[in-house]
Amino acid sequence: MSESLLSIRQLAVQVEDTRILDGLDLEVRPGEVHAIMGPNGSGKSTLAHVLAGRPGYRVVGGEVRYEGKDLLALEAEQRAAAGIFLAFQYPVEISGVSNIQFLKTAMNSLRKMRGEPELDAMEFLDNVKRRLHQTQMDETLLYRGVNEGFSGGEKKSNEILQMLVLEPRLAILDESDSGLDIDALKRVAAGIESFRREDRSLILVTHYQRLLDYVTPDYVHVLQHGRIGRSGGPELAQELERAGYAPAAGAPAAGEPEDKENG
Amino acid sequence: MATTPPINELLNRGYSPGFVTEIDADSLPPGLDESVIHAIVEKKREPEFMLQWRLAAYRHWRTMRVPTWSRVHYPPIDFESISYYSSPRARKDAPASLDEVDPEILRTYERLGVPLHERAALAGVAGAGVAVDAVFDSVSVATTFQKELAELGIIFCSFSEAVQKHPELVQRYMGTVVPYTDNFYAALNAAVFSDGSFCYIPKGVKCPMELSTYFRINAVGTGQFERTLIVAEEGASVSYLEGCTAPMRDEHQLHAAVVELIALDNAEIKYATVQNWYPGDAEGKGGIYNFVTKRGLCAGHHSKISWTQVETGSAITWKYPSVMLKGDDSVGEFHSVALTNNYQQADTGTKMVHIGKRTRSTILSKGISAGRGQNTYRGLVKVGRRAEGARNYSQCDSLLIGDRCGAHTLPYIEVMRPDAQVEHEATTSKISDEQLFYCRQRGIDAEAAVSLLVSGFCKEVFRKLPMEFAVEAQALMEVSLEGAIG
């Protein structure tokens, strides 16, 4: 008898005048891995950003409950403190602030919001180094500016590193596999697997099936026309790979071109 | 400061040095004429050469016109409504020890975290200490460490004391780098300057401790005219820190200081400032006008002068700490972070004047504009006709926070030689929404995110500050950026 960690009911979201999500339902329980697949422009990234609390999206219907509370009432940093993490599809660069400094600031901010004491600098560094090992990243990257000059693969790995260090309860990975070669993909997958725990949940927003070869989801959902039209087990992903996303009878896709949704 | 608590203990969410010490000040009525000059000289018991110099400066000032070329705007200053002298009344003229200092003054310094007690000054940094020349209003109150420095032959005292005890040094060097004819405010300063610091490092002596001075403007309507003179003889070196606080006021207060640095052969002077004058309230009311002339003269060969400043206060900042590179192989450096928030204005920068051979200069200017702040960098790199092999590198970066502020870069490059190498780089950037959201998603709220991003932006300059100051500077940035986003 597991209570939902995340419960989305009939979520409707607009960007300016365009309806992107339109009656989306989703239940995620602790320990579960849910893959959200769908064609370009279907609203996958919108869902990820709305959950994380990014400004610019208008919720025009439905509700989102996280740990039983209204998630949409919280600011982005409060959601982070509640244990929500978003691995960005296009992580931004922050020059002048080193990765280690950023991580430390984030960690201490989270702990402060939760009423926990700040971490000892040495312990923290040791912890980060261990995680670094798990993601097979080079230690020198820690001292570079956040994502500064990082390759696509390094940026994705850096997102996974941050996830491992910050230990969220619900991690939303927005296309963490896109643009990666097979080795980088395996590294990211290994990082995700080491994160998996029975009290933690993952939402994998993914375009392609191949990440799911390495990270076996509990559920696969298809996001189309602004809502989840089909759900199934891991074999659904393989079916979609073979057969593609079935076009709707009649109405065109709800979303806009990929750029707008992800921008 | 090794001896000073971090500034965010001094400043809460507001500006807490905003108290006024109720003290028995001995002030001149407002207005300026020759009798005021005479009165100042009399109160300070200065020798004849000072009276003559001040009078000449005053008379020259009367012939000058207020400069209007800057990009800062302010209502005309009524020079007749300013009182040009204020001193706390002491039982004797100069306190021989701390016991003789007005206890109210000492309490003020305690509240500001300025240490007057030698023990307190030594605590903190192992093996080093910071001597403090404490200035309260227009008169120096006490000087610590004079004995220890004196053993090395170093003179570090108030300007007033230097005029009394070392008149020949003062007469030799004062006005040689910034003559009273230099500009309107330099002339005014020369005529009515109240006090400041004097530092003299003899041949071959490397001053073993950071020297510092605190300033404070207290009495209403008092213009603060400070004058500082630092001389490093052949092979000498010194690192000097200037940190200021000022109380809250409803009317603008003028601060027209002059700082002269002279480095002889193989000498080095490092001058660092963390400036926190009251910037005016969120509507732009009140605040200090900081019109300063700072100049260093690399008189000797292989001499070096570096200016490092963090300017976050003042309603208006108008200053160009400069270096005249006269000696062959001399080096000039300017590192600056200038922040304007709310309605603050800054027109600041530097002048590097290459005169001798194989001279080098480096300019690193970081301007941050937030709120409705207007930040102008104005810099001059001048390579004279005989300045063989001159090299300059300038980097001017602007960071804009919000969409109501302004950043302006006005580089002047005047090169009279084909073998000069002058490089200039400039960037302008914004704190992007992407970066802000990235930080917020990691649990860092918007204000902390801006702080983080800004400190990353300023890092290169903060690195040049003595460690104690770097901590203050960091905290000062955070306080000054309040309300900058949204």
Image (cartoon, coloured by chain):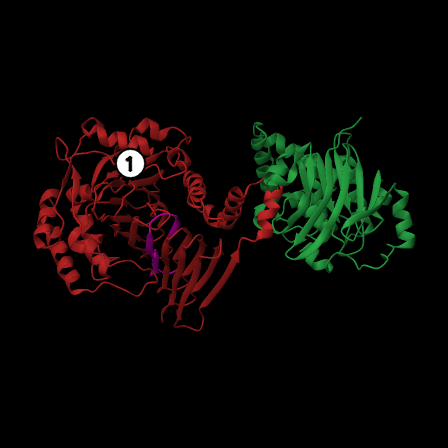
Chain colours: A green, B red
In this view, B23 is above or below B405: above
Q: Quadrant of residue A33?
A: top right
- Check disc 1 and report the residue beneath it: B19
Give neighbour class at mark 1: few <14, some 14-19, many 20+ (Cα, 10 Å). some
The reply to whether the magenta stretch includes residue B308 is yes
In depth, the one of A4 and B103 nearer the eye is A4
Task: Tell me the quadrant of the picture where the N terminus of chain B can be found.
Answer: top left
The reply to whether the magenta stretch includes residue B417 is no
> Is residue A217 in sight in this rendering?
no
Number of on-image labels: 1
- Please state if B142 lies on the left or on the right of B204 as rendered: left
- Please state if A111 lies on the left or on the right of B306 as rendered: right
Which amino acid, by three-letter code, is at mark 1? Phe
In this view, A7 is above or below B230: above
Q: Main secondary structure of the magenta part?
A: strand
Q: Position of residue B409 (x, y in %)?
A: 43, 63
- Please state if B126 lies on the left or on the right of A152 as rendered: left
Give the residue drawn at x 21%, y 62%: B181
In this view, A178 is above or below B143: below
Give the residue drawn at x 75%, y 32%: A4
What chain letter is assigned to the residue under label 1?
B
Give the residue drawn at x 19%, y 46%: B194
Q: Position of residue B142 (x, y in %)?
A: 23, 34
Magenta segment range? B306-328
Is disc 1 placed on a helix, strand or loop? loop
In depth, the one of B306 and A99 nearer the eye is A99
> Is residue B147 in sight in this rendering?
yes
Q: Position of residue B486 (x, y in %)?
A: 49, 49
Q: Quadrant of residue A69?
A: top right
Q: Position of residue A49 (x, y in %)?
A: 67, 47
